[in-house]
């Protein structure tokens, strides 16, 4: 399912504010013309339905999906989920340039404060993992170079004999 509800916001030109529909999202269902609200809306009037994707309400979306009747090509998948390093970079930006603490930055970014802490821990773990992978890769390349040298030496020795 391709949700057009934005779940990420940045100060440096990212997506709209979390929980709001993207600007180009239809405000009414393309089939039944019922008014659409964001998937994250808790309480909404009876004359509305949640937006499920491609401009359709829940009922029309699932009917079209079951029958595989789409009006056009599938929308390009968009990734609005934070990567750990990106989230930590945004947090650092807010901390340094705006003077926001963790709770204020979390509210501005549309995540829980604990998510920022978890992202910082994960970013450190990913950096260690990537460094270790690079060291292993360099060691493997050196081992292959030594092996190739030994094979070449054995070939020269066999040719000389």
Image (cartoon, rainbow, N blue to C red):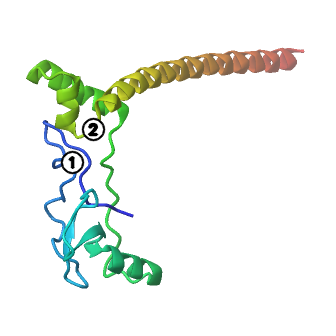
Crowd class of label 1 (few under 14; some 14 to 19; many from 20; radius 10 Å):
many
Task: Identify the residue position indicated by label 2 in the image.
Answer: 111
In this view, 84 is above or below 81? above
Q: In the rendered view of the protein, which quadrant contains the C terminus? A: top right
Task: Identify the residue position indicated by label 1 in the image.
Answer: 18
x then y, percent, for residue 56: 28, 75
In percent of the image, x 15 and y 71: which residue is there? 27
The quadrant where residue 46 appears = bottom left
Depth check: give the residue in front, 60 or 42: 42
Q: Secondary structure at mark 2?
A: loop
Using residue 10 as the reference point, say whether residue 1 is left or right of it.
right
In percent of the image, x 34 and y 24: which residue is there? 117
The quadrant where residue 69 appears = bottom left
In percent of the image, x 29 and y 35: which residue is there? 112
Residue 85 visible within the image: no
Q: CA distance from mark 1 to mark 2?
A: 9 Å
Using residue 119 as the reference point, say whether residue 26 is left or right of it.
left
Tell me whether the residue at label 1 lies in contact with that at label 2, contact meaning CB atoms closer than 8 angstroms. yes
In this view, 147 is above or below 42? above
x then y, percent, for residue 119: 37, 29
Crowd class of label 2 (few under 14; some 14 to 19; many from 20; radius 10 Å):
some
x then y, percent, for residue 114: 34, 29
Q: Which callout, 1 or 2, points at the residue further toward the start of the chain?
A: 1
In percent of the image, x 17 and y 25: which residue is there? 93
Q: In the rendered view of the protein, which quadrant contains the N terminus? A: bottom left
x then y, percent, for residue 10: 18, 39
Residue 88 visible within the image: yes
Q: Secondary structure at mark 1?
A: loop
């Amino acid at each position: 399912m391709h949700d057009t509800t934005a779940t990420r916001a940045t100060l440096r030109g990212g997506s709209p504010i979390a929980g709001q529909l993207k600007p180009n999202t239809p405000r009414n269902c393309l089939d039944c013309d019922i008014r659409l609200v964001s998937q994250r809306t808790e309480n909404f009037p009876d004359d509305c339905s949640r937006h499920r994707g491609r401009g359709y309400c829940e009922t029309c979306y699932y009917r079209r999906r079951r029958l595989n009747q789409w009006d056009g090509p599938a929308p390009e998948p968009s990734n609005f989920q934070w990567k750990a390093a990106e989230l930590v970079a945004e947090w650092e930006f807010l901390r340094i340039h705006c003077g926001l603490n963790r709770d204020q930055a979390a509210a501005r970014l549309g995540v829980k404060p604990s998510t920022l802490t978890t992202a910082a821990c994960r970013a450190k773990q990913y950096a260690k993992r990537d460094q270790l992978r690079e060291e292993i890769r360099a060691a493997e390349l050196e081992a292959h170079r030594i092996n190739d040298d030994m094979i070449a030496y054995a070939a020269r020795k066999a040719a000389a004999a």
